[in-house]
Image: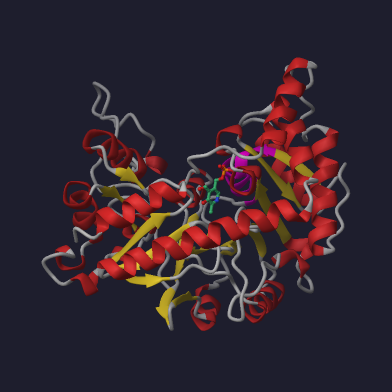
């Protein structure tokens, strides 16, 4: 398995540089670890949406806020002077207790809120701090490709080498090849960076897949960082398992850093409240890096998220049912417009294959060209999945649409896509 030390442009980037140039001496301003990360595709596509008035189904943020009572809890915290000054480094005790209670209630996993929970500035900081803490320059980090764009940048910042293992479409789902994963492990592999439910493919790893990953991690003594920010956005039916945390598998609790976030579950992506659960030793290591990134963040919002995590089960079911209806609406519209649709088992993204649209209309299966033209052609913005790949050719024909939008917005997008 070839490790990727460099590619013309890192995941998430457009392939155009956007890099800040060089100093008078000719030395590039941006340090070489970040040289491959130019302007992100999200910035380019969101600007395109504004310029053309297109419906933005590119970036994954909801267009309505989360529950009123949670917002009011934040207002109360602000008014009562809770969190307006630096909160404690590991997070406010109320939120750490709520995270531990949530892991116990939902998954039967027990964590000590004082030593095994760390609050972060969103999952993004949790990912960066985990990699900075656990990876030495030269270590290899295996990640499932396509991957969320911050993974590549965080691995690069840590001086690690990313080793992508590609999920491939099979029977309507993007599937992890466990043999390929096994082959990717070398004596230099330090950790596996997993993501389930998986953005952008919508795959939810099954019990069997997770068990095999766990066995491999134990056998090869690997650390695992698992990004489970979409844990509550899973559309269970006969073919889709509920989300299972990797830490619940034999031998995993002691080697797994689990990452969660309030942004996705509670629709407050701007609050940037995330968390890590793990052993005291791993949490201490991650905190060592985190304290010099933000030290602390989101004071009053931490109190509000503590209340959110204790919402009744009906809240979580309601979110899922609402998103399931939206998934089905957009999936049907995309299918009718001529796309091949990979109906997601979780998350709020749909990956499509543009090739059935025909060579002309799919720009020969080039997702970049397709997405750049889509706002003019149909008034909708999507993201080319190739930006989430090192092996860009493997992602070329796939395009991602977000469905965390109001029903009327999705219905309007479906109408517009008929133009294709
Ligand atoms: C897989 C994945 N991980 C992490 C994040 C970032 O989460 P946060 O907003 O909590 O930093 C996202 C956001 O899109 C995501 O899709």
x%, y% of residue 386?
A: 32, 59
Report the front residue among 239 and 116.
Answer: 239
- Where on the picture, by quarter, is residue 141? bottom right
Image position of 130 with respect to 228: above or below: above
x%, y% of residue 218?
A: 72, 73
- Where on the picture, by quarter, is residue 40? top left
Residue drawn at point x = 49 percent, y = 80 percent? 177
Image position of 218 with respect to 125: above or below: below
Image position of 236 with respect to 18: above or below: below
x%, y% of residue 59?
A: 41, 45
Report the front residue among 171 and 192.
Answer: 171
User: Residue 161 lies in magenta, yes or no?
Assistant: no
Task: Determine whether, in the image, residue 232 is placed left or right of residue 172.
Answer: right
**What secondary structure predominates along the stretch shown in magenta?**
helix
Q: Which residues are magenta?
A: 120-134
Report the front residue among 229 and 214.
Answer: 229
Residue drawn at point x = 61 percent, y = 45 percent? 123
x%, y% of residue 28?
A: 29, 32
Give the farthest residue toward the left: 360
Image position of 360 with respect to 379: above or below: below
User: Residue 130 lies in magenta, yes or no?
Assistant: yes
Colour scheme employed for the rendering of this structure? secondary structure
Total numbered labels placed on residues in the image: 0
Quadrant for the C terminus in the image? bottom left
Q: Evaluate whether residue 383 shows in this view.
A: no
Task: Determine whether, in the image, residue 46 is placed left or right of residue 164.
Answer: left
Q: Evaluate whether residue 90 shows in this view.
A: yes
Residue drawn at point x = 77 percent, y = 46 percent? 311
- Where on the picture, by quarter, is residue 387? bottom left
Quadrant for the N terminus in the image? bottom left
């Amino acid at each position: 398995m070839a490790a990727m030390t460099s590619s013309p442009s890192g995941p998430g980037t457009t392939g155009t540089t956007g890099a800040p140039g060089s100093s008078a001496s000719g030395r590039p301003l941006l340090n070489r670890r970040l040289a491959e990360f130019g302007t992100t595709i999200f910035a380019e596509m969101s600007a395109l949406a504004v310029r053309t008035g297109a419906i933005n189904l590119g970036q994954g943020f909801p267009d309505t806020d989360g529950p009123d009572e949670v917002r009011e809890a934040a207002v109360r915290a602000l008014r009562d002077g809770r969190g307006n000054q630096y909160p404690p480094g590991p997070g406010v005790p109320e939120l750490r207790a709520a995270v531990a209670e949530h892991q116990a209630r939902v998954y039967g996993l027990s964590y000590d809120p004082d030593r095994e929970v760390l609050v972060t500035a969103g999952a993004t900081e949790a990912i960066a701090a985990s990699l900075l803490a656990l990876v030495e320059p030269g270590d290899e980090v295996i990640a499932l490709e396509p991957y969320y764009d911050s993974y590549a940048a965080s691995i690069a910042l840590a001086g690690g080498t990313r080793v992508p293992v590609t999920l491939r479409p099979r029977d309507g789902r993007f599937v992890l090849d466990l043999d390929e994963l096994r082959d990717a492990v070398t004596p230099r592999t330090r950790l596996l960076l997993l993501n389930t439910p998986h953005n952008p493919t919508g795959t939810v790893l099954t019990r069997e897949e997770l068990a095999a990953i766990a066995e491999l991690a134990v056998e090869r003594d690997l650390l695992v960082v698992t990004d489970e920010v979409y844990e509550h956005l899973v559309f269970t039916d006969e073919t889709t398992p509920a989300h299972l945390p990797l830490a619940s598998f034999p031998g995993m609790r002691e080697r797994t850093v689990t990452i969660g976030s309030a942004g996705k579950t509670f629709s407050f992506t701007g609050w940037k409240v995330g968390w890590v659960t793990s052993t005291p030793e791993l949490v201490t290591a991650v905190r060592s890096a985190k304290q010099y990134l933000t030290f602390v963040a989101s004071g009053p919002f931490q109190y509000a998220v503590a209340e959110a995590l204790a919402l009744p089960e009906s809240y979580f079911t309601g979110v899922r049912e609402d998103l399931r209806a939206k998934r089905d609406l957009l999936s049907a519209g995309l299918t009718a417009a001529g796309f091949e649709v990979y109906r997601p088992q979780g998350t709020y993204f749909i990956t499509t294959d543009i090739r059935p649209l025909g060579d002309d209309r799919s720009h020969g299966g080039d997702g970049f060209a397709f997405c750049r033209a889509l706002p003019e052609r149909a008034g909708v913005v999507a993201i080319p999945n190739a930006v989430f790949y090192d092996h860009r050719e493997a992602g070329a024909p796939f395009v991602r649409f977000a469905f965390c939008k109001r029903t009327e917005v999705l219905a309007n997008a479906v109408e517009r896509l008929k133009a294709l």
